[in-house]
Image (cartoon, rainbow, N blue to C red):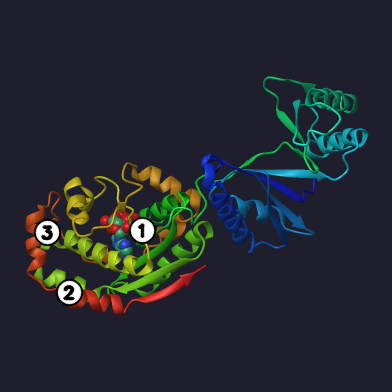
Amino acid sequence: MQYQSFLIKYAEIGTKGKNRYMFEDALIRQIRYALSSVDGEFDVTKESGRIYVKALGEYDYDDTIEALKRVFGIADICPMVQIDDKDYENLKKHVVEYMDQVYPDKNITFKVDARRGDKQYPVSSEQINRDMGEAILDAFPEMKVDVHHPDVLLRVEIRQKVNLFSLMIPGPGGMPIGTNGQAMLLLSGGIDSPVAGYMMAKRGLILSAVHFYSYPYTSERARDKVVDLTRLLSRYAGPIRLHLVPFTDIQMTIYEQCPSKETTVIMRRLMMKIAQRIAEKEGARALITGEALGQVASQTLESLCVTNDAVTMPVFRPLIGFDKDDIMDLSRKIGTYETSILPYEDCCTVFVPKHPVTKPVLEDLRASEAKVDFSEMIEHAISDSELMIIK
Ligand code: ATP
Ligand code: MG
């Protein structure tokens, strides 16, 4: 079956009351953006609480579905046959043809579910159900009706046109990008932070990202890897402003002048401070990290408290309650895993102390940090950072 149209079902945004049109418009924008990289031309329209995607002429079906599956806010994608002709006798023919083409294996049970959006239509929904069911049974005696648990639920919607659909391809859920403001993702080259970015983008946040690198201790390839990860994320999140921040001076200074066991936590505090500064400039109102409680020494409850103390913005840690295995599963699902496990060194791993504190005391950390004047280094790191816009 060659489908030309899709009905887009959305979940949560259906409940947003008066703001609903804003969510719908944002979803339409994101759908258009996602389809702009697919072969073909598409019309994306809104019609009384519905969003339709219509392919104008030839297009790539598989790529279209793949693109739509990455648009947050979509609950289901229903490939649909749209018929202009509302004549009742012809409708039976169309329904039979639909069932024939979509279900080559006729050994199935079905149920017809008709809805009349057009109340002027001369036949009632119940009558349509009966007549269409009968037409299908006449054409394909192997098919059976099952009103409770049908293999196929065929929807016949009488609106301005007639819509026939029965397939539902799950979308990613969530809320359309741009409906919940903007946040700054601290993006390392690891497994966790891209997943954290994905999860928050799924709640409708526009992402910016910041990455700290310590050239020459970390290589050009480690940086490229982060650019690649950002590109993979942008397939879901739309264009991402990625800030690449040189961190070598700060890191060397920490390494030379702070107690060895505290270096990681101090480094995390300075990363957060710089990230917040860049976020403020960008209009981002929260930070996002890939931390999970207890995963490493710098992610114990005490360490997280000390890290949090460095900033005033809310810090979103969507993976906080996740096991590493679950994070890895998600990372495979969203397609970042293979890139994340490439073996290039990260600035955190280069300078990792042998015996990091697991229960840092806030006052001690503040005191150690205060012994060194990082302010000028922080200003330099920010002014020397490089901005890339990744699509
Ligand atoms: P990930 O897999 O995301 O690298 P991780 O388990 O290796 O996480 P850490 O290295 O302790 O954990 O980093 C914790 C969080 O700090 C990361 O999830 C990320 O949000 C941030 N982070 C770590 N290193 C960097 C970096 N070089 N640039 C930007 N953010 C970083
Ligand atoms: Mg890491």
Residue 369's x, y, as percent?
A: 11, 65
Q: Ligand 1 is located in which of the four quadrants?
A: bottom left
Disc assigned to residue 375 = 2
Viewer-side label of 3, 2: 2
Q: Where the N terminus falls, by quadrant?
A: top right
| Pointer 3 residue Cβ closer than 8 Å to ligand 1 | no
Classify 10 Å Cα crowding around label 2: few (below 14), some (14-19), many (20 and above). few
Residue at disc 1, CB closer than 8 Å to ligand 1: yes
Estimate the x, y position of residue 280 in percent, counting from the top left: 32, 66
Pick whichever of labels 3 and 1 is earlier in the sequence. 1
Residue 180 in the image: above or below residue 37: above
Q: Amino acid at mark 3?
A: Lys
Report the disc number at residue 190: 1
- The x, y position of residue 354, in whole percent, is 15, 58
Q: Is residue 27 left or right of residue 39?
A: left
Q: For the point 24% across and 58% down, which residue is it?
A: 312
Q: Amino acid at mark 1?
A: Gly
Q: Position of residue 281 (x, y in %)?
A: 34, 70
- Dividing the picture into quarters, in which one does residue 114 lie? top right
| Label at residue 261 | 3
For mark 3, give the secondary structure: helix
User: What amino acid is labelled 2 in the image?
Assistant: Ser
Task: Find the distance from the CA under tag 2 to the CA under tag 1.
Answer: 28 Å
Q: Tag 2, which secondary structure?
A: helix
